[in-house]
Image (cartoon, coloured by chain):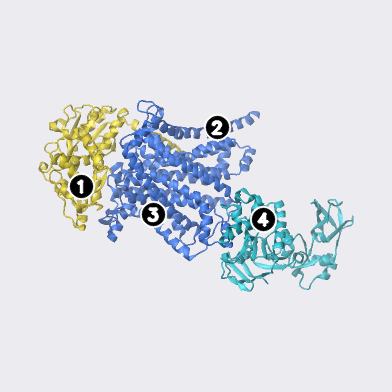
Chain colours: A cyan, B yellow, C blue
Amino acid sequence: MYLTVTNATKHYGSFRALNDVSISIEKGEFVCLLGPSGCGKTSLLRIIAGLADLDEGDVQLNGKSLLKISARKRDFGIVFQSYSLFPNMTVAENIGYGLKIRKIPADQISARVSELLDIIKLPQFADKIPGQLSGGQQQRVALARAIAVNPRVLLLDEPLSALDAQVRGELRDEIHQLQRSLGIPTLMVTHDQEEALALADKIICMNQGVVVQSGTPHELYHKPATRFVATFMGTSNLISTQKIKSIMPELLSTRPGGDDDQYDACIRPESIRIEANPKGEASIVSIGFLGNLSKIKLASPLGNLIVEVHGATDLKEKQKVSLDIAPADCIWVENDVAGIAE
Amino acid sequence: MKKIIAKLTTSMILLGTASAAYSESLTLYTSLEEEEIAVYVKAAEKEMPDIDINVLRLSTGKLGARLLAEAGNPQADVIWGWAVTAMMDPQILKLLEPVKVQGAEKLAPEFRDAKDRWFSQMGYMGAFCVNTERLKQKGLSMPQSWADLAKPEFKGEVVMPDPNSSGTGYLHVNAVLQSMGLEKGWAQLQDVDANMAQYTSSGSKPCKMARTGEYVVGVSVALTAMNSIEDGYPLAMVFPKGGVGYELEASALLSSSKNKPAAKRFLEWSMSDSAISLFGQFKALITVPNVKQSEAAKLSGLPADLSTILAQVNFVESANRQTEIKAQWREKFGR
Amino acid sequence: MSSVFTRRPDGDKLLTIACLVIPLIGLTLFFLYPMFTVFMRSITLADGGLGLQNYTDTLASSGFWRATRHSMLMGFTTMIISVFLGFIIAHGLHRCSFRGKWIIRSIIIMPLLAPSLIQALGLIFLLGRNGVINRVFGLELDIYGFWGLTLANTLYAIPQVVMIIGASLVLLDARVYEAAEMMGAKPTRQFRDLTLPAIFFALLNAGFVVFIVTITDFGNAAVIAGDYSVLATEIYTQVVGLRNFNMGAVVGIMLLLPTVVSYYIERKAMARQKGQLNTNIQPFVPSFMASRDIPMAGVCFFIVGMILAVIAIVIYASFVKLWPYNFDFTLKHFDITTAGGYSSLWITIGISLAAAVGGTLLIFMLNLGLLRLPAAISQTIQVLAAMPAAVPGIVLGLAYILTFNSTSTPLYMLYGTATLIAVINFYHYHTQAFLTVMTGFRQFPKALEEASGSLGAGLGSTAINVIAPFVSPMLVAVFFFLFMRSMVTLSAVVFLTTPQLNVAAVTIMRLDDAGLTSQAAAFSTCVMAVVALALGIMKLILSIQSKRSTGSA
């Protein structure tokens, strides 16, 4: 394990931002810290960066504690949501700043800078100042600036949140490629599950200062451990054990033991198959056409359900339908208090 | 809120026209000291409650400049208590209106203008104000004359008024020059200049600086010295040997005045017995015959017969050559 | 029915026109016209012709050159010291971590609330030849002249420097520093590479503001300069004493030069800052760093300690019997009968209230009028409304006396009235007041006005019921700002006082000039008490307002 955080606890006054958090990042791995705002993910990133202190616990790199090492000396790269370029320096100066601090000769700096400018596809912007760049361009420069010194770890603090949708998608792909080609271990903080799913080798899902679940994107989507993860990672239909028992008892086969309210059933919208059936128990409330798929809201004995089908659908509002759910598609999630019912 | 605004507006309008609203409103220009002005004006307003008295106090030099500058659009009615040497400037005399002021006839001819354009019922004397505490602290001996002030140990410890702006300043310079003769006089002033910490624009300020111990000696006015001693400051009043400068303070009516009856009443009040005795409480010099010396004057060591210490001052000469002397002074000592 | 419909827009138009025309007439009559007059006067010769004779005459006079030389030297020295010290305080407040910053914040505004000669008065009590310091330590410091004046002006200027630099330090993004930190830049390096370039214009601007304030303010010069003549006192002597109006006009025009430069820099700095304005600036929260914060705190507290000391000692001295010989408590200095006594205090309060009421109303009207104007015209008017700040008080005062003392126009009626002093106080501080209210109007959601309009409300009732409550915190702030500045300002009004009409700051100067230092101190204390009371009332009103608005939100 390359970078580890063990039993990290952090208080801000009486507010507990982190509670006994342990995570790890392997060499070359892209890890996303995912969670709603205030879940402690940014605090954790800042602690790893050395920009904030830890109350308890340890941060280690290659088995050596970083706690006594200031942010300046950790050799990490960071990119913030707000770009945070040096407003008084040109793009080239921004990118070369870390090298300049390290007293690298000027000709080597300029070579490295132009190499990076090519990588981020902004070679003609070397002498512009940040104010003259668009948000996406600024964030590319910030990225180049962070990786210019070949950091041991790259930290990304919601790097895409300030950008508009199209730029966000493009830059997401670029970050992905860059990280893969450079192999820099990367930790990215985000509240956007789609981003996390697209980029991460590993997602660490946090809520209220604790790690709720960590694993591959696939694991987190298909095997959410709790109601919280299930709702946060994509859309899901959460149904109480009692309703399943009375209406679709066949789904109980996959359920672990325990009291009725210990687990709820989580069924992803794409796992519900519907068919027009005048005798069906469910009826369509509304249909939203989203291009590649249609989002259908149902009123059913299981409660209100959301169903997604590929492409357009022939179904109409108020039409009666029948439901079909495979037991394998019914995931039983822990009913954590923090979980948000629909 | 509306009421307040309404009231404010009315008061602003009233303030704006205040000077016009009083039919008997009087503007006096004077070089008397602020302290005495306050007392005199209070008494005058009590005597003449129907007259609203406004006073502008300027140092002697500035008052003259102001009168000349305003000649096209005069603002004042009366010149009150202003150096007679300044009053005798022909440019100023042109602005005055001859007036028979009741009581002025008591004055000896040298204290009034032959053409009744001005009269002077009082005057003031120059003096050294010496801070006894600072004197002791510095280990200095009491200065008795201008020559003493030139001693090297007084370096940076002497303050005097600038004769160009202050009548008191001119009074002192004039007294030195007239009593010692021009050549010796200028040499003496030159010697003292080396020790001079500041030339102030106000005549009484040097004394006030000396009394708070900022400097040892303030070349200033006897009146301020007497008041300060009475207040309890560690101050001694010294009349320089070889002649004390003095100046008569004259009053006059400006021919441009739009309130001549009120102005005349004020001038007559200033010659009344009650006014004269009030002035006597402050003034070292009263030119009206048979007026007793004030308690304060006695207390501070002023001799009953002033003629023993006063310099021989020729006012006509003082007035005639003052422009030249002031210019010369500026040339030599201007800072 | 139709008549109702047609009348309303007409009423709105009329109101808009009135809201524009009245304030604009004011600006033209009481700002543009006097400035034009002072310019014309400076090139009008004794024989009525035009020419530069006045300039050559003034430049040829040795007294003028001496005073100019002194002013420049003093202005530059004050500028360097006060920008340096003010920067330390601003940096300490915004970028260091130590306790008691509220103390620094409260002391730093004091000089702006006191008559401008208070520093000199306090310094004489403290550092005069027979002042507290010299007596206690047996020293022989001589405060009169260059250093005393420089020190007094420095203490007066520091708060303005702190505000200007502080405003630009606040805009620095914490994240930028964290990025630099992560890249390995040490704090000293961050300071050099990030902080200094970012506040460069603010430093420059602060320097110019200080320079202008010090060469044009004569409250301190009149008290402590001794016979070290400076431009401001020289103009005062020439104009008020000697009525040498030509020289006044010439010097007035020349004093505009540094201001124009400064104004240009300020605009430039503002434009630059706008370019840098980030979407969301993360405020910098400094964490404690002993090696930096302990010395910084020490220096900051020392500087504000001096500022406090000079003001506190004036208050103290006003209560002692015979400074510096008898320190028994007394109230006798408050029994002021000389130099016109307290009448000037009451008049000043009246003038200040009038300037505040009238000013706030006119500023509100102007902003209301601008609301409905096309952007191009509105911007032109905004530039005009922001111009008075570029004119130093002393120049505006000169312009007024030249304009209103001349019998050639009916405006002469205003000469020597309290109204004119209220007017000059308002136009002297027009810019700051206008910009404050304009900020409020900018924040005002257009939709609210439209909603009110669509409900059938005319501009008048929208203004009173919707807009005024929204901008009321700014109106309150402007009201008290105008009141407090009018209470203490000296440089503009000193030319307009007459024997019949005096204001507090001038009375204090006269008392001091007559050597009645204790009474000058007592009078200053009274003025400060009034201003402090006003400040207290303002804070109270603003806190009630904010409670009410957060309560209802």
Q: SS at mark 1?
A: helix
Closest to the observer, C93 or B292: C93
Q: Position of residue B23 (x, y in %)?
A: 31, 29
Tell if the residue under mark 3 belongs to the same chain as the one under mark 4. Answer: no
Residue kind at label 3, given as amino acid type: Ile
Tag nearer the camera, 3 or 4: 4
Closest to the observer, A259 or C193: C193
C-alpha span from label 3 to label 4: 47 Å
Tell if the residue under mark 4 belongs to the same chain as the one under mark 2. Answer: no
What's the chain of the residue with tag 4? A
Tag shown at residue B192: 1
Tag nearer the camera, 3 or 2: 3
For residue C54, side relative to residue A338 (left or right): left
Badges 3 and 1: C-beta atoms under 8 Å apart? no
Badges 2 and 1: C-beta atoms under 8 Å apart? no
Quadrant showing the N terminus of chain C? top right
Looking at the image, how many numbered discs can be counted on the residues? 4
C-alpha span from label 4 to label 2: 47 Å
Q: Position of residue A318 (x, y in %)?
A: 84, 52
Q: Quadrant of residue C323?
A: bottom left
Classify 10 Å Cα crowding around label 3: few (below 14), some (14-19), many (20 and above). many
If you read the primary sequence from the N terminus, does the residue marked by circle 3 or circle 2 appear first?
A: 2
Tag nearer the camera, 4 or 2: 4
Tag shown at residue A161: 4
Q: Which residue is mark 3?
A: C307
Classify 10 Å Cα crowding around label 2: few (below 14), some (14-19), many (20 and above). some
Q: Which residue is mark 2?
A: C17
Residue kind at label 4, given as amino acid type: Ser
Residue C501 in view in this figure: yes
Tell if the residue under mark 3 belongs to the same chain as the one under mark 1. Answer: no
Q: SS at mark 4?
A: loop
